[in-house]
Amino acid sequence: MIEARIGERTHPAALAVGAPLFMLASVFVSFAAPPFVGALLAALLGAGGLAILQLALAGRPPRLAEAAIDAIVIAAFVASRDETAAIWQLPSHWIDLLRLPSPGVAAACAFYFASAAAVQARAQRHLALRESLSILIAPILFNLLLSLGAAGLMRQLGAWLTFGAVPSDDICVILGRSVILTSFVEVLVGALCIVMSGHFSRDRRLHALLFIAAIHAVLTPVIADLPQTAGAAGPFAQFVIAVAAAALAQAGLWAIVFVLTGLAIDSLEGAPPIFAVAYRHWNSGFVKGAIYGGAFVFLLLAAAAALRAPALIREASNAPLLSAAIGGALLFPLAKTIVGSSDGTPPFFGRLWACYRNPRSYVRGIVAGLGVALALNGGLPELDGLSRFLALFLVGALAYAGVDLVFDMIDAARRRRVMDTWRVYALAALLGGLVGGALGWYFDAAQIEVVRAKFWAYAELNYQETGRAANHLIIYPWFAKWGATDLGVTGGGVRLFYNESLSGVINWSIAAPLFSINFFVLAAIFQRSLSPLKKLLSMEGFQGLFEQTIRVMRWGLWMAPVINSFLRQAPDPAWYNQDGGVRTVAATVANLTMPAGDFRSASLAVFTGLLAYDWLRVVIWFDHMGLRVATLVNLTFIGGDRADEAAARFAGHPARTRIIPDAIRRFATWAPLLIPFYIPRGAEWDTAWTGAEAIRTAAPPMAPSVAALAAAYVAAAARRLRGGRSHCAAMDSARAGGASNGRRTSRGDGRARALCAFKRLHGARAFLGWTGL
């Protein structure tokens, strides 16, 4: 009776506004208030906010026990706060597994609130005890995963397990990591089983698979180091060992990532972890990783062996055009297959065989090879960007449209087919020309030298033998400054390849959610509807968001080595090489309105500000990954379909036909990731570094260029906020019209009202402006 009266007297919209206020206050208190007071206040505010939310959505408040569970979980998060800990800091003591940095506490509380709100919206119930406990142990699992990088703790654990009987530190580290990673995998999958089915899985096959996957993953760095010790076996044996080691190392890394992320996606869809599903995920990752790793290293080492053969080099030098034609014919089908590969494409070797069976592939390769040889011999890499673009545009157009035209004319002469319209060949010339022109513009003399140096870094299997320095690969996942993680010593090309793939999945796991949110926003823009954004607030939308996040994170496994091989540092600032979307617009305006010298000085001042002001670094990172890079990549999926259909209509095909080859579409997808980025060198780098140190020490007034960029970000956020309010006003007007006509309000309208209330309350558009919303 009391619950009914509460539901009658309280307007749901008012409760929907009050609940986020309480939860936001709880998150703020969790990291801003003193420990004991913060734990108490955060628990009360958080439990109160969730109670209000349940009252608004389900029409009844939670039971006392349910509210107590919320308060205990939130208080436990706040009690684990360690104000001295840095973001993503490796634990140095075992007790650190139970501690969280202040941002981690806020993130844990926010995740709990989001999970509780999602369950309330979907099932109109409170989180079950097993679900609350699963969220409670999530930070511990994360710290357990971080501890894999703490060699001291792993060595200590390995020594404990062997009672000090094993003198080798490396073996102790491997044993320690095996126990930690196996425990992590079992606890994670066990938590998924409990949440989904209420009990642990008793399937021995599932546990055996998880154990094998964890042990294999722990051994992957050791496997990647094997080619360094195989030099005495001879060149051919070292070649075989290197290819096998790269395949097995990548297979183990991909398999553990695929099986854990795949089971997590299945759990969101209501499917508990079972052996058959886990094996499918593991097998998919293992096979894809093995093919990627083996093919990557095989091709590199084969090319290196050819370049090390004096007789072959001498013959190629005597007949450069003939050699280029033969090389192009042999390599073009392979290059086309590799570039056209993505998550949803058919098996690699089947596509490769089909490409080699197509006679046009060889002729395209001959044209491309001759064009590249003529460009190199004519000194094209030394010319300006426009000249390189136009020259290779012609080569690309001839390789695509020219070859098609010749083959079609031959078939028409033999009466095997009818010639296509001029539109088909014009479209082919444009597509091929754009690909060739982009490659010509990108590969100037300096970039060719960068790729050459990286090629030999991969091809040298033992750096100690070749005199190359073996350094630790340290990455900074959080905004390229925090969360230093040592991936180990890079002593050879295969280990470098492995370390870069590992760094890719770590770094891209941070940026992946931004790509997913941006994907929904672009979908709303192209559909000219708020439906994708409304869907984002539903459980179905959350599942889609999570699946897209996992997909982007997996991209890092194979994209990182490619990006690190081709990414170009530009010492000279330009309008296009300033990181970030808003920053690019600001740089473009500055480039058009400033003299060249002033623009260079302004760009250097902004870069100095990036080093000096942490807030600016964070904003530019969100602007770059969430707006510029994510938009350019996602446009090729969402806008690419529209462009493909438009191209088909231009060529005379039905509207829904797709005619742009997969290789060209995937080239357009990944090419934006290789846009050069500005970073000063030499004296200008010294100026930026010392200038940033002076700013941090003396705190002088903000440089005009930095202030202008900050104003641009504020203006962009304000514009986004006004746009969100106008959408909400339009929806309010539509609802008023519907009510006057006697139409009933649907559940979708209720979600839309909640969305608008949330935007008005928090200015979500202002915050999400950095990510493209």
Image (tube, helix red, strand yellow):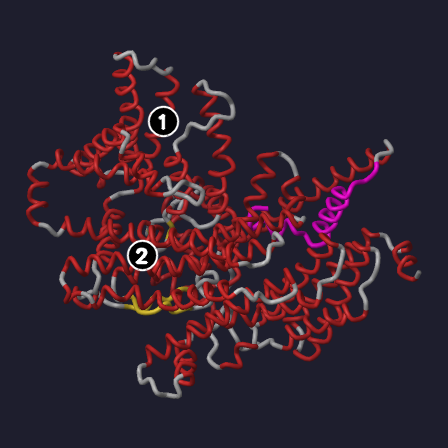
Which mark lies nearer to you, 2 or 1?
Answer: 2
Q: Nearer the viewer, residue 144 or 693?
A: 144
Q: Nearer the viewer, residue 486 or 609?
A: 486
Q: Would you say residue 738 sits in the magenta stretch?
A: no
Q: How many marks?
A: 2
Report the span colored magenta: 744-773
- Coordinates of residue 339 in the picture (x, y in percent): 35, 41
The answer to whether any part of residue 697 appears in the image is: no
Instruction: Residue type at mark 2: give it.
Output: Ala
Q: Residue at x 75, y 39 (%)?
A: 731
Q: Nearer the viewer, residue 222 or 590?
A: 222
Disc marking residue 247: 2
Q: Main secondary structure of the magenta part?
A: helix
437 relative to 148, above or below:
above
Instruction: Residue type at mark 1: give it.
Output: Leu
Is residue 561 shown left or right of residue 260?
Answer: left
